[in-house]
Image: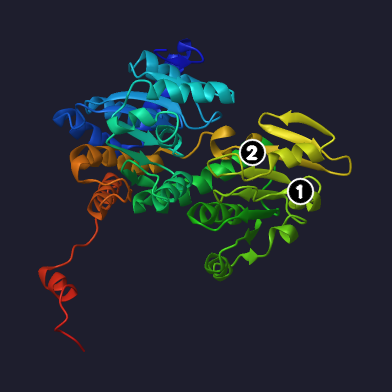
Amino acid sequence: MKFDVKDVGLAKEGKKLIEWAAKDMPVLRLIREQFKKEKTLKGVKLAACLHVTSETANLMITLKEGGADVYLTASNPLSTNDAVAASLVKDYDIPTFAIKGEDNKTYYNHLYSVLDTHPNQTMDDGADLVGLLHTKYKKQISEVIGSTEETTTGVIRLKAMEEKGDLKIPVVAVNDNLTKHLFDNRYGTGQSTVDALMRSTNKLIAGSTFVVCGYGWCGRGVAMRARGMGAQVIICEVDPVKALEAVMDGYLVMPLEKAITQADFVVSVTGGKHIVDEKHLKKAKNGVILAQAGHFDIEINKPALKNLAKKVRRVRPMVDEYDFGTKKIYLVGEGRLVNLAAADGHPASVMDMSFAGQSMAAKYIWEHAKELEPKVYSLPSSIDADIARLKLESKGIAIDSLTKDQKKYLNSWEEGT
């Protein structure tokens, strides 16, 4: 297949969305101009597995204008914007394989389609392409010089592969960039998750009891925004340090079995499996709304939810009612990444920094492939600092600089009390 999208006729609408997002992506625009001038990625054949959104489209255009031969597929069956996918194909000649709501078989056929092009670099959001290169596409792994990874869940998988000695290619963990996880994970996930819950349910957040499972950067963001909307926020954690941090930040902390008995909303954002399990579902308050903001749809035990329900029906777009007979539980976005399944995902101004990191990571791999070993790398901190500096400049914000004397003091030990 040359491409597989819902309807190429949606391209006109998609192009407007891509252009709208571009207005809030000044850092990526500067990188694009540099890449285009220098043809930084000439010779790269890149297979990307990312959420097919207007922001991702701007990343793909940047890579292509840098000289790369780019192929895109979706990293989640519900995260595709069909109009954007159509525009990428028609207006930008970027082969795209993504249809919102595609079934599991189609999802994997799309993954196969981009790998069948024999890429020499990959770009992942969840490590699905890297996973296939180490299983079904083992014969091609020698052709791939490296990959980049966008999200926490993918980095967890990759580090597990590295620890077991199974990782055969170098990977740059873009998620570990400070300009990614401090901003995308906290401010992007925080706003877009609450936005998705408000759009899909039309419920009032103020005055509700809002449970957040996991207090990593994403969990912090969701908790912050829910509290800002007037909710009483409860944090559920397994890490004692993060739990203590949540307490010090002013949140209630308790086990989920207790929290779910009073919860109006429960959002799991851990990257783990069956965080909201059968025992929690049995104790859940009537009318509780469940959602997850992690990458894969495993944080809520959907098979258990289905087995416990006597009847299931869709009551609003992207909201399913599970009727237990004695109570009802509502699942948003089919238990998938809620901010993309039931809303538009992160704002473009946040993805600007994340995708600036992806672009620079692709360049880094291309230029340093011979030096890189099969392990998980972080992008050099100097590149991270450059991204932050460009973002500040785009906002018209200036900061101070150290003087020569200050630098000397910070790099010496002789001058004491």
Q: Quadrant of residue 357?
A: top left
Residue sitting at 21 percent across and 89 percent down? Answer: 417
**Distance of label 1 from label 2 (alpha carbons):** 14 Å
Q: Measured along the vertical axis of the image, is residue 349 above or below residue 262? A: above
User: 262 left or right of 121?
Assistant: right
Q: Residue furthest left?
A: 404
User: 215 left or right of 154?
Assistant: right
- In this orientation, which residue lies closer to the viewer: 411 or 73? 73
Secondary structure at badge 1 equals: helix
Residue sitting at 33 percent across and 38 percent down? Answer: 147
Mark 1, residue position: 281
Q: Measured along the vertical axis of the image, is residue 333 above or below residue 167? A: above
Query: Where's residue 224, x and y in %?
Result: 54, 56
Mark 2, residue position: 335
User: 262 left or right of 199?
Assistant: right
Q: Is residue 217 visible?
A: yes
Q: Residue furthest right?
A: 326
Earlier-in-chain disc, 1 versus 2: 1
Residue sitting at 78 percent across and 56 percent down? Answer: 261
